[in-house]
Amino acid sequence: MASADVLTAPGIPASDNHDTLSHLPNLRSNQGDYVNPSSTGWMRSTTLDTPLEEMRNRFNEHGYIWVKNVLPREDVYDMREHYFAQFSHTGMLHPHHPLRSGIFNPSSSPTAHQGIGGVPIASTNHLLNTAHADPTYRTFLAHPSLRSFIRHLTGWNQERLVDRAMLRHNCPGSQSTGIHYDQYFLRDSDDEFLTAWVPMGDCAANGGGLMYLEHSTSLGKTLERHFLRQAENLPRAERIDAFNQCMAKDGFMSHDAVEFQSRHEREVGRWLVGDYKAGDVVFHNPWMVHAATRNEDGEGRIRLASDLRFYEEGARVDERWMKVWTHDDGL
């Protein structure tokens, strides 16, 4: 990413449409210390009226593009409310706030209400299985505003969404998604797919949303070549497995943003985050290294987001991912 794309003044977001410049909060991942402020920065946001060529240039250069207002805000909050209604009896949600707000119940333990990326208890796994197969969610995934923008951005005549879309809730103080790039979870497919990360509600920079490691596309490709060389003598089923003996036990490369960034400091830049709003979508390539921030939202909001992977129709997809997510699918 060119130095002009993220402003160098501390705490100033480089954006096409922010009227109010905000201070970048302290950030951390599941484990480890807070990232030094000099090693963090704001992502660049992109408006829908940005010329298509410029959008594609940003995506190709940076590995991601954060697009504002792709989806109608109320449609996103309707989906958020519907999801949390399925958890209304669990004690996870604050009893004096609307479900739509998704405020965590401070009298509950975050570890008792972990979602994907953490270690959900058995009753939560059952609810997660139901939520992923829910017709309202499956309909939301076909939202015409999202699908038409993807065709616009990519130039594809038709897109194909893998059935294994994921809904991730992340309560303040609970564990969430570790450091990874997407390709190693979908190794049995073409590596030309597009991930769409859809925040289901407003999500502050320190509210459990994604942070992206600047300049990390090349690193992701290098690491994948290394992992594949290590696994070249394994049976094919194991070779394509993100949890094989050459990978970490939980599939993530690390849970410590400070340690990982330091280990690769010659190859990457800063951890970049956004102050995401309902309706925004971040698109990233299969190699871009990213993780969730630890949710330390000042209002106690539960982070809810959906991870979607799109291929051009006719591309080779990973058939393991052509089934609706369940907690025990081994992927």
Image (tube, rainbow, N blue to C red):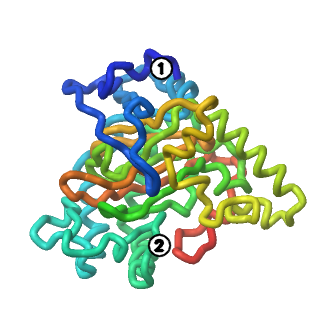
Q: Is residue 198 visible?
A: no
Q: Is residue 262 visible?
A: yes
Question: In screen coordinates, is 256 left or right of 232?
Answer: left
Q: Nearer the viewer, residue 39 or 22?
A: 39
Q: Nearer the viewer, mark 2 or mark 1?
A: 2
Residue 240: horizontal and vertical position, in percent? Answer: 75, 59
- Using the rendered view, name the quadrant where residue 71 is placed: top left
Does residue 309 sit above or below 171 in this rendering? Answer: above
Sooner in the amino-acid sequence: mark 2 or mark 1: 1
Question: In screen coordinates, is 128 left or right of 266?
Answer: left
Q: Quadrant of the C terminus?
A: bottom right
Residue situated furthest bottom in the rendering:
123
- Circle 2 residues within 10 Å: few <14, some 14–19, many ≥20: some
Q: Label 1's element? A: helix
Residue 29: horizontal and vertical position, in percent? Answer: 44, 51
Residue 119, numbered circle: 2
Residue 280: horizontal and vertical position, in percent? Answer: 34, 41
Under mark 1, the amino acid is Glu
Under mark 2, the amino acid is Val
Residue 80: horizontal and vertical position, in percent? Answer: 28, 60
- Using the rendered view, name the quadrant where residue 63 is placed: top right
Residue at position x 77%, y 44% in the image: 225
Cα distance, mark 2 to mark 1? 41 Å
Does residue 228 sit above or below 80 in this rendering? Answer: above
> Mark 1 — residue?
54
Q: Nearer the viewer, residue 138 or 91?
A: 91
- Circle 1 residues within 10 Å: few <14, some 14–19, many ≥20: few
Q: Nearer the viewer, residue 184 or 211?
A: 211
